Image (spheres, helix red, strand yellow):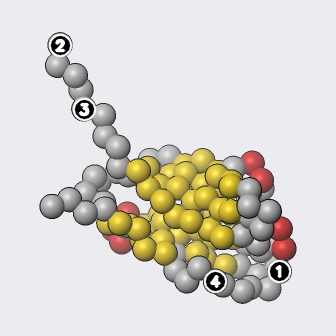
Amino acid sequence: MLCDKVTQSSPDQTVASGSEVVLLCTYDAVYSNPDLFWYRIRPDYSFQFVFYGDNSRSQAADFTQGRFSVKHILTQKAFHLVISPVRTEDSATYYCAFSTMMQVPRKS
């Protein structure tokens, strides 16, 4: 049986402005190079892409302004989001997700 899952740190974390916060995310995927994502839902219920990464590349949303980064630890299957320094406008519910969609070549 194939089983893919994501485990996140506590959804409620309170941190002081100007400090650093690390949002923990680990994943268990059958596929060895999943597409990993961080998204957030802000207090006004707007949904925002935050960060993307896989084994060889990454991309951050423009609003991250170099304050957001990811600790991608392949051996631990970890994709932790780091925000530093934290600002009040970073207040949101953050979600870690991944996709393991693989393209299978078509037979000619």
Q: Earlier in the sequence, mark 4 or mark 3?
A: 4
Q: Earlier in the sequence, mark 1 or mark 2?
A: 1
Identify the residue under disc 4: 12
Position of residue 75 relative to residue 32, above or below, is below
Nearer to the camera, 51 or 2: 2
Identify the residue under disc 1: 17
Q: Tell me which corner region of the image, top left, top right, bottom left or bottom right, holds residue 86.
A: bottom right
Evaluate if marks 1 and 3 touch, with contact meaning CB atoms under 8 Å apart.
Answer: no
Q: Where in the figure is residue 68, as x and y percent of width and height?
A: 68, 63
Q: Is residue 72 left or right of residue 47?
A: left
Amino acid type for the residue under numbered disc 2: Ser
Q: Earlier in the sequence, mark 1 or mark 4?
A: 4
Q: Where in the figure is residue 13, as x and y percent of width and height?
A: 66, 84
Q: Is residue 59 left or right of residue 88?
A: left
Q: Residue furthest top?
A: 108
Amino acid type for the residue under numbered disc 4: Asp
